[in-house]
């Protein structure tokens, strides 16, 4: 697993560093401030997060064994691969939308999610800055139903690669024109608006992958140009240890 994580990090670096240089949304320095904090998430905190998500996948396989009829699982596993990948994406993103929204709307949870929103310069590396409890809940819990339904390992692997690449892309400082595709798949500009520190953008664009969810639930901003200010007014320190511990301590105060 350690090798997988380092390998993935290197591949993403090789893809996104040149792209951010060639097609930037915002012009900026090669080494922005607080990059070391995000490197700490990418190569350290990731192990806690991965362990948590894997534990939830085990839970969902137990739920599947106990409650999901074998006939349903067989039917799901025999669907064409593309249908399975699309179904995982839709089911997982509905879960992601609501859990993500809960992390914005419930004050005790916002302490955790504010860490992710403390990013003031969007790029591929900043995508890593997510509190492990936030990441385990939004990613892990949203996968419980798909895993319980019995989609095939090949479908999860294909969706996982796509999800990962897309997750880096939507946080990145890469200006790839999506055209009409921006209504189907969250573009970098779309997700940048979720991170904007501009009042009309607060609590908007929750969807991880499918903007249609924000359109249905009336939380979409579909501007074509990127915002010019990112971050949150919620006080978040730039120290990794503080970011990891403070939300837990705050929560016990609540
Ligand atoms: Zn958010």
Image (cartoon, rainbow, N blue to C red):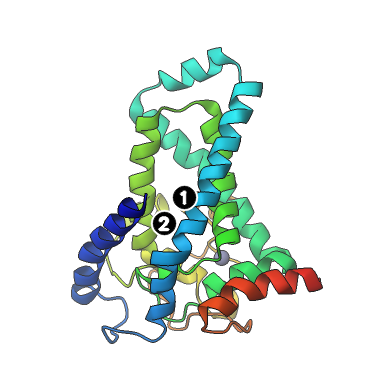
Callout 1: few (<14), some (14-19), or many (20+) C-alpha neighbours within 10 Å? many
Residue 57, visible in the rendered structure: yes
Tell me if residue 170 comes above or below residue 63 in the rendering.
Answer: below
The image quadrant where one finds the C terminus is: bottom right
Q: What residue does disc 1 label?
A: 210
Please indicate whether residue 181 sits to the left or right of residue 150 in the image: left
* Label 2, label 1: how far apart the Cα atoms are: 6 Å
Residue 246 image-quadrant placement:
bottom right
Q: What residue does disc 2 label?
A: 186
Please state the horizontal and vertical placement of residue 26, each as a whole percent of the image.
32, 81
Please indicate whether residue 48 sits to the left or right of residue 78 in the image: right
Q: Which residue is drawn at the image coordinates 53% and 70% (left, top)?
A: 116
Please state the horizontal and vertical placement of residue 105, each as a whole percent of the image.
70, 64
Q: Tell me the element at label 2.
A: loop
Tell me if residue 62 comes above or below residue 25 in the rendering.
Answer: above
Extreme residue in the right direction = 254
Tell me if residue 243 comes above or below residue 156 in the rendering.
Answer: below
Tags 2 and 1 touching, CB below 8 Å:
yes
Residue 60's tag is none
Q: Which residue is drawn at the image coordinates 60% and 22% (left, top)?
A: 65
Please indicate whether residue 181 sits to the left or right of residue 231 in the image: left
Q: Tell me the element at label 1.
A: loop
Q: Nearer the viewer, residue 135 or 249?
A: 249
Please state the horizontal and vertical placement of residue 212, each as a whole percent of the image.
50, 50
Q: Ligand 1, what quadrant? A: bottom right
């Amino acid at each position: 697993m350690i090798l997988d994580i380092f390998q993935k990090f290197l591949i993403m670096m090789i893809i996104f560093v040149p792209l951010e240089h060639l097609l930037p949304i915002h012009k900026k320095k090669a080494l922005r401030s607080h990059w070391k904090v995000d490197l700490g998430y990418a190569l350290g905190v990731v192990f806690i997060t991965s362990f948590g998500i894997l534990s939830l996948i085990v839970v969902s396989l137990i739920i599947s064994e106990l409650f999901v009829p074998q006939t349903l699982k067989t039917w799901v596993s025999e669907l064409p691969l593309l249908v399975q990948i699309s179904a995982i994406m839709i089911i997982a993103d509905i879960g992601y939308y609501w859990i993500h929204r809960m992390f914005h709307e419930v004050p005790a949870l916002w302490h955790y999610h504010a860490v992710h929103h403390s990013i003031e310069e969007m790029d591929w590396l900043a995508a890593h800055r997510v509190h492990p409890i936030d990441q385990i809940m939004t990613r892990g819990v949203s996968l419980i139903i798909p895993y319980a339904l019995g989609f095939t390992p090949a479908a999860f692997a294909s969706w996982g690669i796509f999800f990962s690449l897309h997750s880096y892309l939507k946080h990145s400082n890469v200006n790839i024109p999506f055209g009409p595709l921006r209504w189907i798949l969250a573009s970098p500009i779309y997700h940048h608006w979720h991170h904007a520190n501009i009042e009309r953008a607060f609590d908007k664009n929750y969807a991880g992958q499918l903007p249609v969810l924000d359109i249905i639930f009336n939380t979409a901003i579909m501007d074509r140009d990127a915002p010019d200010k990112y971050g949150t007014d919620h006080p978040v320190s730039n120290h990794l240890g503080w970011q990891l511990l403070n939300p837990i301590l705050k929560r016990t105060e609540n």
